[in-house]
Amino acid sequence: MELKLTQKQFRRLLDLVYIGNWVLNSTRGDDRIRDYDKVESLIFSHCLTQDMSALTELYEGEIIPSRAFAEGGIHEAIMAYEDAILFEILAQELALRDLNDPPLTPENYNEVMERTNEYLGEFERYGTDHITVDIEE
């Protein structure tokens, strides 16, 4: 297979590959999905012929994204996504809890979304400052 990309498109592909592998493997510890690591290594190996060698380093015989790449802002994008998802999931879970945890159905969708949006507005204004948890013992 041959894929033709501009340098800018290739640079964006590096971001996508890194983010994809991060999502799939970052929480797996030693149980990583090695096939994705191999694809990441293969894609990043092309940096060596594209005047982008600073974006790679050699680790245990494999080409991986360099520390410069990882510290170049990509994790800020991942963190922004994680924050958005955290608040969206939390808001929906709290809305469902308020309604005694029904499954989401067409009949309760509007009410759940209204409550969800109220929580999202709260999170947007105050972050987690107004969240309290009562731990019962």
Image: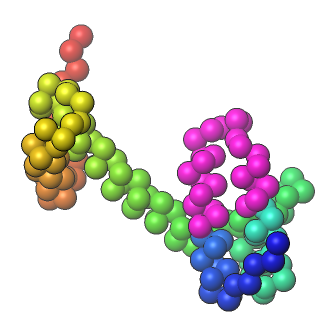
Residue sitting at the far right: 61
| Horizontal arrangement in the rendering, residue 28 relative to residue 62 (left or right) | left
The chief SS type of the magenta part is helix
Residue sitting at the far top: 137
Residue 36: say if magenta: yes
**Quadrant of the image occupied by residue 111:** top left
Q: Position of residue 79 (x, y in %)?
A: 44, 58
The C terminus lies in which quarter of the figure? top left
Examine the rendered structure and indicate whether residue 34 appears above or below residue 132: below
Q: Is residue 131 in view from this perspective?
A: no
Identify the residue at horizontal 46%, vertical 66% (top origin).
77
Residue 90: say if magenta: no
The N terminus lies in which quarter of the figure? bottom right
**Quadrant of the image occupied by residue 104:** top left
Q: Which residues are magenta?
A: 16-40
Looking at the image, which is closer to me, 101 or 70?
Answer: 101
Looking at the image, which is closer to me, 101 or 48?
Answer: 101
Q: Is residue 124 in view from this perspective?
A: yes
Examine the rendered structure and indicate whether residue 123 appears above or below residue 63: above
Identify the residue at horizontal 20%, vertical 27% (top origin).
101
Examine the rendered structure and indicate whether residue 7 appears above or below residue 24: below
Looking at the image, which is closer to me, 132 or 34?
Answer: 34
**Model colouring:** rainbow
Q: Position of residue 57 (x, y in %)?
A: 79, 67
Residue sitting at the far front: 106
| Horizontal arrangement in the rendering, residue 90 relative to residue 40 (left or right) | left
Q: Position of residue 135 (x, y in %)?
A: 22, 20
Identify the residue at horizontal 70%, vertical 41% (top origin).
32
| Horizontal arrangement in the rendering, residue 65 relative to residue 74 (left or right) | right
Identify the residue at horizontal 18%, vertical 41% (top origin).
106
